[in-house]
Amino acid sequence: MTLALATQTAIAFNDRDENLDRDDGPVPQPVRSNAPSQFARFVDDEIRAGSIEPDMRILKERARTWLRNDEPGLALNEAWLESKTCGLVSFTRAFVRSYNGFKTGAAAPF
């Protein structure tokens, strides 16, 4: 055993932080769901329902109404609803614009 390896081994055994704070409780498991995300469901609704890219004001109103119906408790907190609506609108608008460009582009596959 070389001196460097012996030193690393000694340092590893002296690292007691890992051994003093042991938690023997169950490991929390992530929540898994097969349901699609809110963004995916809203974008899907917008693509299926609309043939043209809507105005931002119209899209924001649709998103706000859709979120109120999808999460009834969200309507109680107006600031959180506004924040989530803005995120949903910007994501949807970017996706719809990209999707329309892909669908109607020069080398569109369909």
Image: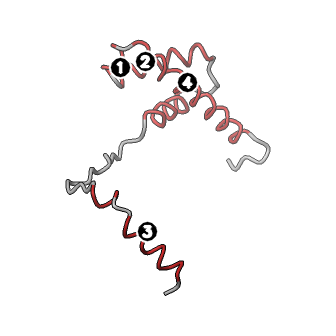
Q: CA distance from mark 1 to mark 4?
A: 16 Å
Does dot 1 land on a helix, a strand or a loop?
helix
**Label 3 is placed on what type of residue?**
Ile
List the residue tagged with mark 4. 89
Question: Which residue sits at x=63%, y=17%?
Answer: 55
Q: Which mark is residue 81?
A: 2
Question: Which residue sits at x=71%, y=37%?
Answer: 101
**Label 4 is placed on what type of residue?**
Val
Residue 21 appears at what percent x and percent y? 27, 54
Whether residue 67 is situated above or below residue 76 in the rendered picture? below
Question: Which residue sits at x=48%, y=34%?
Answer: 39
Q: Which mark is residue 11?
A: 3
Query: Which numbered disc, 2 or 3, marks the residue that appears first in the sequence?
Result: 3
* C-beta proximity under 8 Å, tags 1 and 2: yes
Q: CA distance from mark 3 to mark 4?
A: 53 Å
**Label 1 is placed on what type of residue?**
Leu
Label 2 or label 3, whichever lies nearer to me, is 3
Label 2 or label 4, whichever lies nearer to me, is 2
Does dot 4 land on a helix, a strand or a loop?
helix
Q: Is residue 103 rendered to the left or right of residue 1? A: right
Q: Is residue 55 rendered to the left or right of residue 80? A: right
Does dot 2 land on a helix, a strand or a loop?
helix
Query: Which numbered disc, 1 or 2, marks the residue that appears first in the sequence?
Result: 1
**Label 2 is placed on what type of residue?**
Leu
Whether residue 82 is situated above or below residue 16 in the rendered picture? above
The residue carrying pointer 3 sits among few (fewer than 14), some (14 to 19) or many (20 or more) residues within 10 Å by Cα, namely few
Q: Quadrant of residue 10?
A: bottom left
